[in-house]
Image (tube, coloured by chain):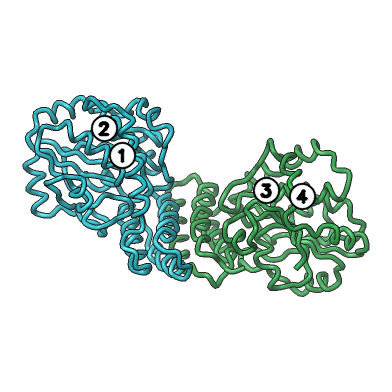
Chain colours: A green, B cyan
Amino acid sequence: MKSHYYCSQCLTKQVIRTCELATEKRELREEAVIECMKFLGSFNLKETPSYFGSQIQKIIKEITGNSDPYRIYKERSTEFAEKMIEKLSIDSIEKALRAALTANSIDYGGDKIIEYKETFEEMMKAEIAVNESEKLFKEIEKAEKIVYFFDNAGEAVFDKKFIDFFEAEVIAVGKRSPMFNDITVSELKKMGFENVMDCGDNTGVLRIDKKLEKELKAADVIISKGQANFESLPELWNGVYYLFKVKCRPMSEYLSIPIGSDMVIKI
Amino acid sequence: MKSHYYCSQCLTKQVIRTCELATEKRELREEAVIECMKFLGSFNLKETPSYFGSQIQKIIKEITGNSDPYRIYKERSTEFAEKMIEKLSIDSIEKALRAALTANSIDYGGDKIIEYKETFEEMMKAEIAVNESEKLFKEIEKAEKIVYFFDNAGEAVFDKKFIDFFEAEVIAVGKRSPMFNDITVSELKKMGFENVMDCGDNTGVLRIDKKLEKELKAADVIISKGQANFESLPELWNGVYYLFKVKCRPMSEYLSIPIGSDMVIKI
């Protein structure tokens, strides 16, 4: 998905938020904001929002010397997710999928910081707006190999629970290095995943190298979490199940679906 | 006051809001946003926020062909103010000042759109954080000539009520042409002010021409409404009473006063 004119507002918010997370030093924040604004002078509607977002991250990391500004948030999200998952009795793949979708709200990358502590269980009751999950469950059941593109830390705790219901071999795909609050390959390994691959990080375009391409070709099912992956992945690969919450106005307009809607869709 | 790094976020919000008010045509909105972002590539901390804000307005007006994007909001604000003032029995200069300060909330220029319909009377009860109004009242009482810098439309209805308590000759100062929701000289004339002067418009710096300078020198009291005037006017003129509500984080940090605080201060 190409950028919407509205993305300029969200990107500038990301600049401020990331700079403030990255450093306490006023001069470094100022320098990073000014450099990011210079870069956003090149804002256009041909590139994906992720391209601009990732370039901003790169600039801020370089200037502030902080390679992982969202580290604290990621840790907090993971703690929250671990506590929350204890409270829920997830005893079926259906419930696990529902929880993993709800957990897509634990996000700090977009226009709003969403972390519905008290209402997580309420949110799980919401109807999935576009729901191809029955088809997905059937494919999962028959599959021997599944590739799973992860999204954010915290949320990944719920993804893991969902994956626990798979009998197939699972290839877990994360970011090579820190990018917003996205989970990285090393964090996926720490979570216990054995087959882990990366899909790039700071180029703003998901990168599918030969090794990952081979796995995608061999996979019976490909699952991708999160809106940002949905923005880029369809241009690179067909037949992917996207599980995400519609989080911003441009995406809402693009899909003609209200913000907050949960999606399980194969493209 | 020079720009704060945080102003970049507020300015980008202003871009989107103004473009959407200026035109329904998607292509024009897109063109205007891209041009504004190009301009904001020059964002720095040496210029005032008003400089950037006014340049944005200029770009959007040129591209969309709409010379007054905030016209509808201004009309709505004025209607609201006229209804509200009917409900309040403003029978003293003290109450009139309090109402004029509260009316500074009727604003669409900054980070948030503030229009507290139900709570206007509640807001009038709030203590003025920095309050030199007693000194101001004494000066008004003795004055023969008062220069009054107006801020937004709508709010101006309350300023007029406040001015009704002055016995001095009043010079009403507004913007030469539309600028956000600021009141213009022609609108001040329509409101019944006879001595009206302008302080510029789209240069981003208040402009004090020879004629206005003469009046300022001759004035016994100078009153300036609104945060934006407070950002620029102290560099041009001394001994001005500023009446405004602290509306954003940079100003709050600059003054070490919470957002939402009411100020009556002579500088």
Q: In which quarter of the image is residue B66?
A: bottom left
Q: Is residue B14 above or below residue A5?
A: above
Residue at the location (48% across, 67% down)?
Answer: B26
Give the chain of mark 4.
A
Say which label, 2 or 1, has the lower sequence index: 1
Side (left or right) of A8 relative to A178: left
Cα–Cα gap, marks 3 and 4:
9 Å
From the image, tell me which residue sits under label 1.
Answer: B82
CB of mark 4 within 8 Å of CB of mark 2? no
From the image, tell me which residue sits under label 4.
Answer: A100
Cα–Cα gap, marks 2 and 3:
44 Å
The image's mark for residue B12 is: none
The front one of B198 and A141 is B198
Q: Is residue A30 above or below residue A240?
A: above
The front one of A209 and A170 is A170
From the image, tell me which residue sits under label 3.
Answer: A105
Q: Where's residue A187, x and y in %?
A: 74, 52
The image's mark for residue B264 is: 2
Residue at the location (35% across, 28% down)?
Answer: B124
Q: Are marks 4 and 2 on the same chain?
A: no
Query: On the rendered image, what quadrant is the C terminus of chain A found in?
Result: bottom right
Q: Are marks 3 and 4 on the same chain?
A: yes
Residue at the location (30% across, 38% down)?
Answer: B244
The front one of B180 and A204 is B180
Q: How crowded is mark 3: few (under 14 residues within 10 Å), some or many (20 or more)?
A: many
Q: Can residue A184 be seen in this view?
A: no
Which mark is in front, 3 or 1? 1
- Residue type highlighted by circle 3: Ser
Q: Is residue A235 above or below residue A116?
A: below
Which mark is in front, 2 or 1? 1
